Image: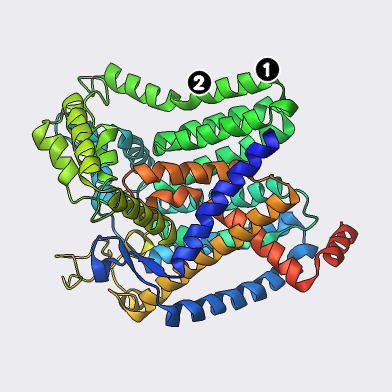
Amino acid sequence: MSKMLHKSFYLILLVFVAVFIASSLLVRAQYNYAMYGDNPILGMQQWSIFLPVILLLLGSGVGLYALCLKLNQYRPKVVIPIVLLCSLAIQIIIIFVFPRVPTDDSQTVLSLAMNMLYDQDYSSFETGGYLHMFPFNYSIVLYLKTLLYLFPDNYLVIKLFNILFSTLTTFMIYLIYKQVNDRSTERDYGVLIFAATYLPSLFLNNLIYNDVIATAFLTSCLYFIIRFVREKSWKTIVIAAVFLAMGNYFRSIGVIVLIAAIITILLNMRSLGTKKVILSIAVLGMLFNVPTWTQNAVLQSSGAVSEPVGENAAPVYMWLNMGINLERFGFWDNMESYQIYQRQANYNKAESAALFKQEIGSKLSEASASDLVQMYYKKIIWTWTEGTYQMDRYGIGNESSIGAGRGRGGAIAGSYSYTNAVTELLQGDSAYRTGLLWIVYVMNFLMYCFILIRLIGGIRRKRYDEVSLILVILGFIGFYILWEIKSRYIYPVYPLLVVLSYMGFKDTYDFIFHRKGTLEQYSLRKR
């Protein structure tokens, strides 16, 4: 029964990945703020660019992998710190070369942190305030407030902490890989180098928000969940629970990882034992909301808020309503849903929830079955194949103020505190910026190709060691079928895609070059 469930999860993800790959052969998902504004774009695939970039990346990947194999002779205590330090250096260079200033929500949370720190101003929790509507973002406000209190008031300090969290994620990617691929007799430094140089993770340190932090915590949680299943140690499940609680505190998607963790533990009931399964799930559940409960208790006891936090916050139905949109297939609906909550319901959670339910019902009844199928197809394809996690806007930024982009008016979001020769080269929709986005987009496509190979190989060999990773990815796919979408929202699963795709790449390389047996013998001799 357990093996059947494992295989089912693999098959479900295999179907989705196959759809992503097949669709990408015909459709190009884009997010290019300079050209199209804040809009999700699905256009015809441009094979004259797509195919050459595929060949370029495949050739580069094979060459780099061959170089990585030469590192097998060196000890992890030498290679791992060097790779992580090099990654740190690259990330620091990027935040100096692209000094993107906060915009949108990142500017709002930073301003609120400064108001609370310097003026003791908590009015944002009052009716109509930002934290009244979105109290879950108090976590990032509190985090920024703490950094501003402890360190110099500077964007660089915040971005440097982003870099530390991103580096932690890179290290956890390597540790997860070693846990789920423990049959490998090699040291597999290639996955570490891939994670350390993954372009979206390098650039999104420029985003002063919760994505990078939550990703580090949730990835760490998954690593300790995998270790718990293997080692059956109470210490690992407690550490996993703490990381999960913190990850969920910064981004309220931790429930996806919680459900995946519970299913993973249940699938291993025979080896863990019923008692340990029940107690481990209880530990995860009990600690899950502790940070939020503590925060709310402190705010109420200090008099910073006059009513329980979240009592009249925007309801989840607002984002579900945004997620049903035939024209923009679930992308930001240009304040339409906000106006229902703010103007029609006057910031009342219960009233707005009823209005949103009515709106959702109307949308579903008025749209034909064909319209809904097309919308959900476009929604899934754009979210998962856009591939850059919107690093164009949130990572690179742009100083241009020319309002020439289609579907947009006014300045491009994400300007710089100063400009330089590199920012000038990547300004607007320049060939350099477009080329960089193409590389990241095609890299994402190739990752799916290698994930597909890994999934097929796992099913054929009846080895399902990566099921915990697959459950998390499936959870994100299911959640964002319903929710409002941005490709940035699935950033927390990039570590899992890196692990699975590297496994598929390694399987392919070993098969083509017939090197597995000889290299295993080589590795064993070196040990």
Q: Quadrant of the N terminus?
A: top right
Figure check: 150 above or below 159: above
Q: Where is residue 360 drawn, in percent x and y? A: 23, 38
Residue in the image at 58% along x and 32% along y: 263
Q: Which percent across, then down, holds residue 399?
A: 25, 69
Amino acid type shown at disc 2: Met
Residue displayed at 67% across by 70% down: 65
Label 1 neighbour load within 10 Å: few <14, some 14-19, many 20+? few
Q: Residue at x 18, y 42 (%)?
A: 337
Q: Quadrant of residue 450?
A: bottom right
Instruction: Determine whether the residue tagged by mark 2 lies in a helix, strand or loop.
Output: helix
Label 1, secondary structure: give it.
helix
Answer above or below: position of 326 versus 410: above
| Residue 224, numbered circle | none
Mark 2 or mark 1: name the one nearer the start of the chain: 1
Query: At label 1, which amino acid type do we have?
Result: Lys
Q: Residue tagged by mark 1?
A: 275
Horizontal side of 512 relative to 193 (left or right) equals: right
Given residues 241 and 470, the one toward you in this image is: 470
Mark 2 lies on residue: 286
Tell me: 189 left or right of 423: right
- The picture places residue 202, in percent across and down from the top left corner, at 47, 61
Alpha carbon of mark 2 to alpha carbon of mark 1: how far? 16 Å
Verify CB contact (< 8 Å) between mark 2 and mark 1. Answer: no
Identify the image quadrant of the C terminus: bottom right
Q: Position of residue 32 (x, y in %)?
A: 31, 67
Asked whether 347 or 333 is in front, the reply is: 333
